Image (cartoon, rainbow, N blue to C red):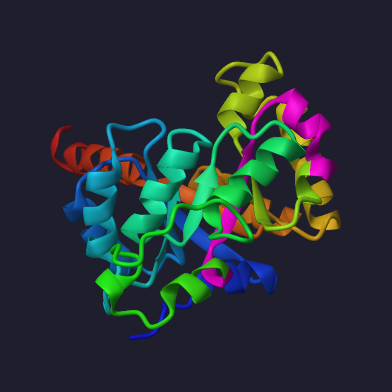
Amino acid sequence: MELPVNHFKKNILAGKPQIGLWMSYWSPQVVESCAPAGFDWMLLDTEHCPNDPAHVSMQLMAMQNERSTAQAVVRPAWNDLVLIKRYLDAGAQTLLLPYVQNAEEAAAAVAATRFPPEGIRGVAGSSRAAQYGWIKDYLKKANREICVLVQTETRLALDNLDEICKVDGIDGVFIGPNDLAADLGHLGDIPHPEVQSTIMDSIKRIRANGKAPGILVGEADGQRMLDAGALFVAVGSDVGVLRMGATNLAKKFKK
């Protein structure tokens, strides 16, 4: 058995835009039902939803099959060595690490995802990631398929953006629009001109540093972000799709 190729990593490094769906429900059934929809990636969130490594493991099983078009991106609740190890062992190959403020924190994120001597990831040769030992030479091959995305969501992080981008092993930088708006003094007001100009400037800076920019936006802003140069863009969420679908269906029959 061969180690799966991380097509998400391969595509963003090649400059090929990747369209995503943000998953906040912890249900593997919800993930499984959305995985064949045609998205390039799906974010399994554990920062702002009641999710944990056991649930994520089941979600990964639900979407890693022949029907799925999407690759999994897992967001741990924090840039934490132990959490990173657990999600990698569960089979995640791409991680989005929140609230990275500087180059040192970015370097720590990379080190946590790499087996020695390149990093400090704990070694387990019979994990699900290694298909319980069936993947030949997993420990020697795993590092090359790991994709590290870091989340910049404050003024301080953007002040340090160029240094963060220069960290070897960082593949992409995700702009957190909600937290960024809050830190800029515009809580809940992502459309504010200062927030929007900061996002656009950040995308340009990330691209200029040779990294892939990413962001979560609504459907109406997806193409605008792609046109601005973002390479991995989540254009909606499971919560939003369900809420709007239910609302529109009810309106058809409730005059």
Residue nearest the observer in this picture, 51 or 180:
51
Which residue reaches farthest bottom? 1
The x, y position of residue 250, in whole percent, is: 17, 38
The x, y position of residue 11, in whole percent, is: 60, 72
Say which quadrant the N terminus sits in: bottom left
The x, y position of residue 139, in whole percent, is: 46, 71
Quadrant assignment, res 10? bottom right
Seen at 38% across and 83% down, the residue is 136
Which residue reaches farthest top? 185
Q: Please state if 4 lies on the left or on the right of 13 as rendered.
A: left
Quadrant assignment, res 210? bottom right
Q: Please state if 195 lies on the left or on the right of 113 as rendered.
A: right
Say which quadrant the C terminus sits in: top left
Seen at 53% across and 63% down, the residue is 146
Quadrant assignment, res 182? top right
Asked if residue 30 is positioned above or below residue 151 in the image, the reply reads: below
Q: Please state if 123 lies on the left or on the right of 188 as rendered.
A: left
Q: Is residue 153 magenta?
A: yes
Asked if residue 242 is positioned above or below residue 101 in the image, the reply reads: below
Seen at 20% across and 53% down, the residue is 28
Q: Please state if 239 lies on the left or on the right of 220 as rendered.
A: left
Q: Is residue 53 magenta?
A: no
Asked if residue 175 is positioned above or below residue 29 in the image, the reply reads: above
The x, y position of residue 7, in whole percent, is: 51, 74
Seen at 60% across and 55% down, the residue is 119
Residue 216 makes an appearance in the image: yes
Residue nearest the observer in this picture, 252 or 108:
108
Residues rendered magenta in the picture: 144-163
Residue 221 makes an appearance in the image: no
